[in-house]
């Protein structure tokens, strides 16, 4: 009988559940593996700060959290989860989530851009740049890519120079045509 329908929010929308579930999953790991593992105070604080931030997507909900706890506990030197272990795990999660549903043909940005630049891009710019890089890789020349990307606006210009416009756009991100098509 289908009487009620309700939406259970994901872990990213229930940040108050992260800390108690972090403790629960760590205890479960210890019982399962007959090991004693604990966070250093600083490492715990750092992980919770990340886990409850907007950067933490938790796209696989508890599977992501359980996986993170398992990896950190497994890699904990002497049963102590350190800040270094937390930093490695949060970087791993960021990489995983940065490609969740973003790059239409593989990991476009992770291949083309330095991590420092990716971290400085707004989502709007990132999505637009991903699209531009995808088109560039489908074309044989800078001019062809420019014509495709500026197909509508070029008809309104007296002297369309799509290749130059595209070259300048890529340069804003420190990229050249040669770098883009070489990846």
Image (spheres, rainbow, N blue to C red):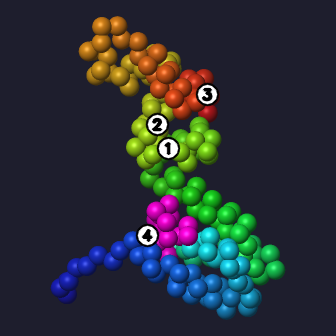
* Cα–Cα gap, marks 4 and 3: 36 Å
* Cα–Cα gap, marks 3 and 2: 14 Å
Q: At 45% from the left edge and 46% from the top edge, which residue is drawn?
A: 122
Q: Disc 1 vs disc 4: Cβ atoms closer than 8 Å?
A: no
Q: Disc 4 vs disc 3: Cβ atoms closer than 8 Å?
A: no
- In the structure shown, which secondary structural element does the residue marked by tag 3 occupy? helix
* Cα–Cα gap, marks 1 and 4: 21 Å
- The dot on residue 12 is 4
The residue range painted magenta reads 49-62
Crowding at label 4, few (<14), some or many (≥20) Cα neighbours within 10 Å?
A: many
Q: Which residue does the numbered mark 2 point to in the structure image?
A: 129
Sequence-first disc among 1 and 2: 1
Q: Disc 3 vs disc 2: Cβ atoms closer than 8 Å?
A: no
- In the structure shown, which secondary structural element does the residue marked by tag 4 occupy? helix
* Cα–Cα gap, marks 1 and 2: 10 Å
- The dot on residue 121 is 1
Which quarter of the figure has residue 82? Answer: bottom right
Q: Nearer the viewer, mark 3 or mark 1?
A: 1
Sequence-first disc among 4 and 2: 4
Measured from the top left, where is residue 161 in percent x and y? 41, 12
Crowding at label 3, few (<14), some or many (≥20) Cα neighbours within 10 Å?
A: few
Q: At 61% from the left edge and 33% from the top edge, which residue is drawn?
A: 183
Q: Nearer the viewer, mark 4 or mark 3?
A: 4
């Amino acid at each position: 009988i289908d009487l009620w329908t309700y939406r259970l929010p994901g872990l990213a929308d229930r940040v108050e559940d992260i800390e108690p579930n972090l403790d629960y999953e760590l205890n479960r790991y210890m019982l399962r593996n007959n090991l004693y593992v604990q966070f250093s105070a600083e490492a715990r604080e750092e992980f919770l700060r990340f886990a409850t931030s907007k950067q933490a997507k938790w796209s696989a909900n508890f599977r992501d959290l359980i996986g993170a706890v398992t990896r950190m506990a497994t890699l904990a030197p002497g049963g102590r989860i350190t800040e270094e272990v937390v930093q490695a795990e949060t970087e791993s999660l960021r990489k995983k989530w940065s490609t969740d549903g973003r790059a239409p043909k593989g990991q476009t940005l992770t291949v083309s851009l330095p991590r420092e630049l990716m971290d400085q891009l707004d989502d709007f710019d990132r999505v637009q740049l991903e699209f531009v890089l995808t088109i560039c890789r489908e074309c044989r020349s800078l001019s062809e890519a420019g014509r495709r990307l500026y197909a509508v606006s070029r008809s309104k210009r007296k002297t369309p120079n799509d290749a130059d416009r595209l070259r300048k756009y890529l340069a804003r991100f420190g990229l050249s045509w040669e770098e883009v098509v070489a990846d």
